[in-house]
Amino acid sequence: SSLLEIRAHIPTETTYVYRANSEAEAKTWQRALETAIASEQDKIRATLQLLSQGNTAYKYNYSNSKRMRRHFWMAEDKLELCWAKSRQEEPQTMELADCVGLLHGPMTTTFQRCTVREDPPWCCFSLLFQDRTLDLAVPEAVIDAWFLGMQYLLLSRNPALKAVLSEAEFTYRKVQQKIRALAHSRGLTTRRLILNRLRGVWDN
């Protein structure tokens, strides 16, 4: 058959049907899609393994916005996020089933109350719960794994998760925040910084 049927279940149950020009072309597309899916599954497995191992990160206190260094990791069953001063201590936990949303960047009240924030904005994210937020900053080298990995786990349990970002949208958000931070450090607006850079390219 020259028809291709693709079924997705995240963020919602969806079926896409495409018609190729020929059966041979359909098989070529099928092989390419299967290769891409296998590659993505390998990436997800590596990401989840990193989350299970955990990282040192900073937790911003919900009550006073003070910053605390903790070790964060995913429980073995991937149902709870755990943290403690060290992996050997009894951890505090939050169940992913109770999370209703995920935000990238210092967007919540907890972050906004900080008079001085020591972490880059693109390394910050928040898990949203009904009565509070869990606000974290992780090293830049692992922000992709933590944000996209957490989003994957949350979507697997709650397809109606709020504020979902594709990988491309997440990358765009990070670049946007980096440009904004650079402009702020030079006392410029983002628009003025971009215009200055464009003029420099044009002059050269």
Image: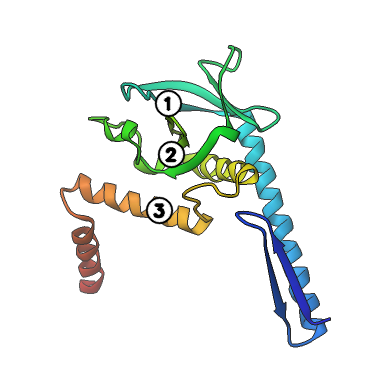
Instruction: Name which of mark 2 and mark 1 comes first in the sequence.
Output: 1
Residue ID at (49%, 42%): 101
Q: Quadrant of residue 125?
A: top left
Left or right: residue 74 versus residue 103 is right
* Extreme residue in the bottom direction: 21
Dividing the image into 4 quarters, which one contains the C terminus? Answer: bottom left
The residue at which mark 3 appears reads as 173
Q: Where does label 2 land, which residue?
A: 125
Q: Position of residue 183 (x, y in %)?
A: 23, 51
State left or right for residue 146 relative to residue 186: right
Q: Is disc 2 placed on a helix, strand or loop?
A: strand
Q: Position of residue 146 (x, y in %)?
A: 53, 39
Q: Which mark is residue 199?
A: none
- Distance between mark 2 and mark 1 Cα atoms: 10 Å
The kind of residue on which mark 1 rests is Lys
- Which residue position is annotated with label 1? 59
Q: Looking at the image, is mark 3 or mark 2 earlier in the sequence? A: 2
Marks 3 and 1, how far apart in space?
21 Å
**Sequence-first tag of 3 and 1:** 1
